[in-house]
Amino acid sequence: MASFTDEMWINLPEHIVVHIFSYLPFYQRCKCAQVCRSWLECFNQPFLWKTFTFQFYTELDKRYLNLLKQHGHHMRAVKIILDQHEKVNRENACQVLEILTKTENQKVSSLTVEFNGENPLFYGGLEFIQSLKTFFNSDATNAGLLTTVDLGGLWIDLTQELLDVLSSNHPNLRILNIQNRSLICKIHPDCLVRLVGRCTNLTHLSLFYCSLSDEVLEALSDESRKPIQHLSIKCRRQEKYVKTLSPDAWTGLVKKSPNLKVTLIFDHNCLLQKVSSILCPEIPVSELRLETFTMLFDEINMAASYYKHTLERLVLQTRGSKELEEALINIATRCQKLRSLLVYCVLSKDVVENILNLCPTLKENNNYILKWTKDPEPWIVGVEAGD
């Protein structure tokens, strides 16, 4: 016989149960749905299916597909995470896209696909390119509805044809991330010019430097489109072969989008001499990530001079030296908006204390990595040596 307390839980108003369910991981929601008939009805409420994450790590995860057939028309934001090394996971992930494509009254507006494992040997990911193309195509029931597409978690080469299909059929796109982990970027600036021209509401764009050109920046500066709010640009070895963006093109873009924030990322494959040529004072850099594992004090001093009014976050993967410490003091002194500083090398204790005194918000927000002893990894943001 149920206790009085049990009956109280079972008789909770439906909207309260749905609200509680919204905070639970999916597997806990499934367990709760078995408590009673009323909770099972709450489990099936459309509100709880608006945002859903599919995870494929084993063959058992195929059960997600049955839920998709039942609730796919309720989903608005879909995220697919998988271990792409196993064929069954890849097949299940592609089936999600195929089932959504065929779902009547499907209204997905946000799509994220993320690999969370290692690619099989010589893996090209062609099945994902084809499934995504079909999903983006105008024949799909969600034509024109997508506003957010994040493909940054894919370890495959994206194609220009894929982006053309996306931009042709979803002109209301606002957020696009194609800054993925493929070794070579095959997206030419001409493709970006077409995409920017079609998607005039685009406000957040993440991509590789080699996909940009003065013409792309000019297209983003067009008077007929919304001002761009954030550009994330990653620079790698490929930038050795592309032309550096002109200061005039950046000036025109900033004039059109005065609130623009730019993230610049330089990874370990980027030639060091290319860093200083890409940095220019006309770019409103709010986040700078110098992850080259080389001596960077000249580039840091350059950033302190160029971005003293805009720089909010600095990440460094470099080698410790006296010149580096002087450059960090310089940037802490000049960049008054700096709120996050992550330095992955050992500094002297006096320098760490000096930086934290110059930028008290770093310590107030616990948003820094500054070490004076070499602690075991991983280094945790906001924890000093000796804490």
Image (cartoon, grey):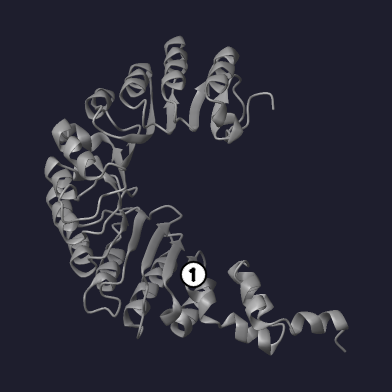
Relative to 29, residue 237 above or below: above
The residue under the point 43% across, 33% down is 312
User: Is residue 380 visible to us here?
Assistant: no
The residue under the point 18% across, 67% down is 168
Relative to 311, residue 2 above or below: below
Relative to 173, residue 335 above or below: above
Residue assigned mark 1: 52
The answer to which of 102 and 315 lies nearer the viewer is 315
Classify the position of the N terminus by image quarter.
Answer: bottom right
Badge 1: residue crowd in 10 Å (few <14, some 14–19, many ≥20): some
In the structure shown, which secondary structural element does the residue marked by tag 1 occupy?
strand
Residue 160 figure quarter: bottom left
The residue under the point 21% across, 40% down is 255
Residue 31 figure quarter: bottom right
Tell me residue 216's x, y (percent): 16, 46
The answer to which of 83 and 140 lies nearer the viewer is 140
Tell me residue 253's x, y (percent): 20, 42
